[in-house]
Image (spheres, helix red, strand yellow):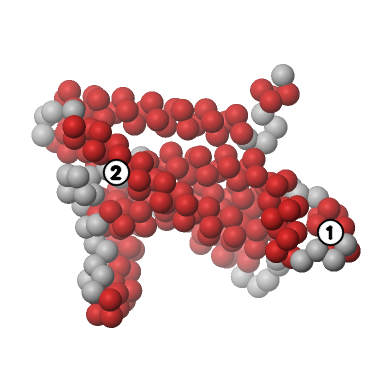
Amino acid sequence: MDAAWIALALSLKVAAWATAINLVFGVGIGFLLARRRFPGRDLLDTLLTLPMVLPPTVLGYYLLVLIGRRGWLGAWLQEHFGINLIFTWQAAVLAAAIVAFPLVFKPARAAFEAVDGQLEQAARVLGISEMAIFFRVSLPLAWRGILAGLLLAFARALGEFGATLMVAGSIPGKTQTLSVAVYEAVQAGQDGLANLLVLITSTVCVAVLLAAGWLAPGHSGRRA
């Protein structure tokens, strides 16, 4: 029983950090692609959407190549700062953030594209800075779509398995998230623990998806 709650706490921690990272980068890049046109824009959009369709194990392999002891980033971090990301909860955060990134980026871009550009232009005429326009005009008008995407990304990060297992492993209390704990419980024949872990995961994900659906633009429940 204790193992289930430890895995839940770690999963929530990993999902929260991954969602916070995607809040910054997903919203920022979504706004950039919604408002700027430049060569390679469509290619960049495709590359950023790839984690949605690539197998998680492939993403995990890419991460190993990047942050592993022999990876160019991993070797640099180890040499200069003594930091080793492999088999740490931080590696699980990175894996979850990458896998869930399109679920923030795509809704954020769509939400910003739906904002009336004339409102932003009117703000410019009034002499408001671009940063102020983003926080006072664009973001308040797009927040529902962004928040729905963030909730979906949180649920996806909570259930991430393949990439997490490859870069973080399954160390109880340190890197063993709910999805990995389910796999380990099934492999060990611990059906009771597996059932409990599945129930916890399903309950949390259903609650998050219900909240995301209610926040989605155009949801009829808000007009009732």
180 in relation to 128, above or below: above
* Depth check, front residue: 49 or 105: 105
Residue positioned most to the bottom: 80
What type is the residue that disc 2 sits on?
Answer: Leu
**Quadrant (top left, top right, bottom left, bottom right) of the N terminus:** top left
How far apart, in angstroms, are the residues tagged by discs 1 and 2? 44 Å
Residue wearing tag 2: 10
Q: In which quarter of the image is the C terminus?
A: top right
Amino acid type, residue under disc 1 in the picture: Ala
Position of 71 compared to 129: left or right? Answer: left
In the rendered image, the residue lying farthest to the left is 188
Callout 2: helix, strand or loop? helix
> What residue is pinned by disc 1?
123
Q: Quadrant of residue 66?
A: bottom left
Mark 2 Cα within 10 Å, few/some/many (few <14, many 20+)?
many
Q: Where is residue 140 in the image (x, y as percent from the top left)?
A: 70, 47
Q: Residue at x 65, y 73 (%)?
A: 39
Q: Is residue 128 left or right of residue 156?
A: right
- Residue 11 lies in quadrant: top left
